[in-house]
Image (tube, coloured by chain):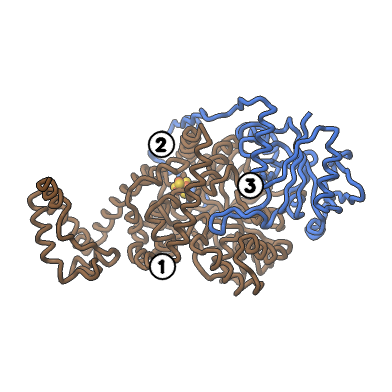
Chain colours: A brown, B blue
Amino acid sequence: MTTSASWPDVPAFPLAAKSALADAQMRRNIGMATSTIREKRTGVVEEMPDWEQLREAGRALKERTLRHLDEHLLTLEESVTRAGGVVHWARDGDEANAIVTRIAKSKGVSEVVKVKSMATVEIELNEALEAAGITALETDLAELIVQLGRDRPSHILVPAIHRNRAEIRDIFRRTIGPETLTDEPAELAEAARRFLRERFLRARVGVSGANFAVAETGAIAVLESEGNGRMCTTLPETLITVCGIEKLVPAWQDLEVFLQLLPRSSTAERMNPYTTLWSGARDDDGPREFHLVLLDNGRTDSLADELARQTLACIRCSACLNVCPVYERTGGHAYGSVYPGPIGAILTPQLAGMRAAGSLPFASSLCGACYEVCPVKIDIPTVLVHLRDRSNKERAAASLKGRLDPERLALKAVAKGFATRGRYERLQKLGRLGQWPLARKGKIERLPGELGGWTKARDLMPIPDQTFREWWVEREASR
Amino acid sequence: MNAARDAILARVRAALRDVPEAERADDVAVARDYRTEGTLPHAEVVALFAENCADYRANVREVDAAGLPGAIAEALAARGARRLAIPADLPAQWRAGDGVEWVEDHGLSHDALSAVDGVVTGCAVAVALNGTIALDGGVAQGRRALTLLPDYHLCVVHAEQVVELVPEGIARLREAALAGQPMTIVAGPSATSDIEFNRVEGVHGPRTLDVLVVTG
Ligand code: SF4
């Protein structure tokens, strides 16, 4: 696939996962956090007798949006312009970054305050601003933790989910102080409040993303918890919002669905503490200047794939991450992509291009838990299989080397081996005899020659002395 | 810049080649068969709002109209709030309390708003199902910064402003939305779930939220 998008490199998931699996502390942190949120989510979803109807409406509304996206984009442009905002269009991240940088520079600022936005992480806006001599200050607690810890986000909602409270305390002590800080969450929050307060008050340019953009009224919605989103979108004289073109909803009324689906699915609350909605700019309330940057960056490539198009319905709630057994064990960094977990496995390769991130659709066990929780009913397993197929085809087509890919060859051989029962049992016996030079401490970490590709990223359990079938036959015989 | 606009729109249209020419957006069916109209008696709606709003650790109290000024004075005294920012159109009878200084917002600076002890406002609508309060800049609500910078927010909600369901709340905000009014929907005091996914109250927005629900 060719794409006009500018995307950071995505390292192969399997290699990154192997080292992530070895990080016991991180696995514990993520395991604790995701199990907490899973339980809470189930509670707030179960109290909604019409949850399934809401999910279906959410799915259908996004279908309505995407199938007529050109029309809705033009309506949004008109509404925002009428309300005193300026609309910009950006084909890729570089264009979007250039627009934001130009506006910030024209205001003569050396710092902008930012509220968490996946789209701006995706286009590496902070780095672009930095290169232009402008500091982008992340104001979300979790983003701040990531930024101060010189770390990378690992979750789309709670980017510092891989850090526990003691680690956060240490990062704060090292950076914003005070030295005497404890790991009491309320105290950690207070430290962030003190650090950011002055900065909010003197900020002249704010940068945000958008959860929803209502074409009919031009309203941009930002859902958040801490109040930093309100600060960034209300206090500065100039506000710049970077919004993926898939974030639209056609009508004001449609918010009645999404404002119910999103909070219960993401932070597992009936509603998140603060939701800000604004259209354009006004003289008497909030920023006097508003810029909306509509971002493509590969989204139209996804739109062109009829089956995978539904990926663009994603409202970034992160429920699919929280239920994913693969995510729970590897964490977000292993995906090497801004969007980790099941959604990342299908979104990143479409946006960044199969060749950049073609290994991600394989980072799943296809258990289907993600589909069940998805508030807009994205059929992630089906899209995954579809993309695996696309990735394989594109890989095979890409080069002769692709056709001789050891994994493909090995899988072909395996398929042969599984084809008949006799052949399978003979192979098992052969395998048992042949594996002894490879097995160490009960697992095989490296296969020889061409087969090494398989174990580069996986440990293999050696074939046991007795198969289940052999054990069963023996057990039945001895009864 | 227009080149980018044209290019994106062209790419969108090319990507949607499978959509029949004659299809309109509204042809894509959306069943709104979720709950859109409440069924509870109004007294129960109000009680449910109070319960769900308090669940976010807001302090919710029901009072009757005659008792409102007294309840405001009591709340302010309990919080030790003596200088209160208010929207200029806050009803006179709400300005209750001995020795309280009322600072009307006629474009107060951010520093001035930060320096007051709290803010008193009304609201546009409240939703029982999720315990939220919406402010749309209408009567007695003021601009967004007013309810953001002070550390304490006392919000007066009239029973008739409380609806049962989210769709009912969104419908009540529609007129303000079409007029381009900025809005804030509030569910309790500011909080974060960023530390181990546990909710901790009190980050950047008001750390204390008192709600007086006026019934009768
Ligand atoms: S794919 Fe669905 S569950 Fe996953 S983040 Fe997006 S909306 Fe949420």
Q: Is residue A18 above or below residue A475?
A: below
- Look at mark 1 in the image and give the residue it sits on: A23
Left or right: residue B33 compared with residue A353: right
- Look at mark 3 in the image and give the residue it sits on: A275
Q: Residue at x 72, y 56 (%)?
A: A235
Left or right: residue A42 compared with residue A275: left
- Look at mark 2 in the image and give the residue it sits on: B19
Q: CA distance from mark 1 to mark 2?
A: 48 Å
Q: Disc 3 vs disc 2: Cβ atoms closer than 8 Å?
A: no
Q: Disc 1 vs disc 2: Cβ atoms closer than 8 Å?
A: no
Same chain, labels 1 and 2: no
Q: Residue at x 86, y 39 (%)?
A: B69
- In this rendered view, identify the residue nearer to me: A234 or A434: A434
Q: Residue at x 8, y 53 (%)?
A: A423
Q: CA distance from mark 1 to mark 3?
A: 36 Å
Q: Amino acid at mark 2?
A: Val
Q: Quadrant of the C terminus of chain A?
A: top left
**Mark 1 vs mark 3: which is more N-terminal?**
1
The x and y percentages for residue B29 are 47, 30
Q: Is residue A374 above or below residue A159?
A: above
Q: Amino acid at mark 3?
A: Thr
Residue furthest toward the front? A479
Q: What secondary structure is marked by label 3? A: strand
The x and y percentages for residue A367 are 34, 47
Left or right: residue A27 compared with residue A478: right
Residue furthest toward the right? B99
Of all chains, the one bearing label 3 is: A
